[in-house]
Image (spheres, rainbow, N blue to C red):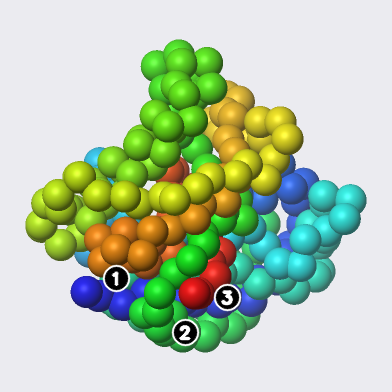
Amino acid sequence: MVNVMQIRIRLYLLSDIPASKIQMETAAFLDKQLVQDEEFAKLHSANQFKNYCYDSLYPVEPDRIYRKDKIYTLTIRTMDRNLAVFFEKQAVNGYTEAMKALTAEVRLIPKKQIALIWPLTPVILKCESGYWRDSLSIGQYEERLKINLLKKWKQLYGEKLEEDFELFTGIEFLNKAPIAIEYKGIRLLGDKPRLHIAENQTAQRLAYLAVGGGIGEMNARGYGFCSYRWM
């Protein structure tokens, strides 16, 4: 298995940004850096999982306005070592009208038994009916998250895992109501499920993958970024 690399970039804001737009502005910053490299420009435009995800900026502002002239930390994770090096060495020179990078540091997240994962940014799961609760049970929701991780594994390793195994032993929703996000002029609804991870090898492999690449969809737009607790 490849390793999860974590990159922390210190960003200086050049304008005030409301929390509702911070993921969009951060995505624009990362996209601008990626398209300047021939290899990663192809990744950016390809219709595939991008194998990276990122958190919202830290510290969180209580009034939900990120401030001009303040410095925040952006945490990115990836299982692509070349991409981690790119973010560390190249993105640190990047800027947009909204933000400018100052420094970056990389660390390896070790492989240990994972007990829990939970998203720090909302998990997005697209359904034909719109919001998943309008058409899926909680069991079906869990299954969709599982299938999504299995597809990410197959793309990353070129290997199909058997689907008959227990991944989650429990699920709790940390949000009382759906979390609305803005994306390309539309409104999507997401959730923050805390997921208890089974101890079998396949479940543990996929949990580590989720830490590195996120859960659900739109991970390269800043959604489904997970924290974790070891056993």
Q: Please tell me which residue lies in front, 212 or 170.
A: 170
What residue does disc 3 label?
9
| Marked residue nearer the N-terminal end (1 or 2) | 1
Query: Which residue is at a point 29% across and 71% down the rendered structure image?
Result: 80
Say above or below: 181 vs 88.
above
Q: Quadrant of the N terminus?
A: bottom left
Say above or below: 181 vs 23.
above
What residue does disc 1 label?
80
Amino acid at the residue labelled 1: Asp
The image's mark for residue 106 is 2
Q: Please tell me which residue lies in front, 100 or 186.
A: 186
Query: Which residue is at a point 38% across and 42% down the rendered structure image?
Result: 145
In the image, 159: left or right of 151? left
Residue 156 shows in the view: yes
| Marked residue nearer the N-terminal end (2 or 3) | 3
Q: Please tell me which residue lies in front, 90 or 218.
A: 218
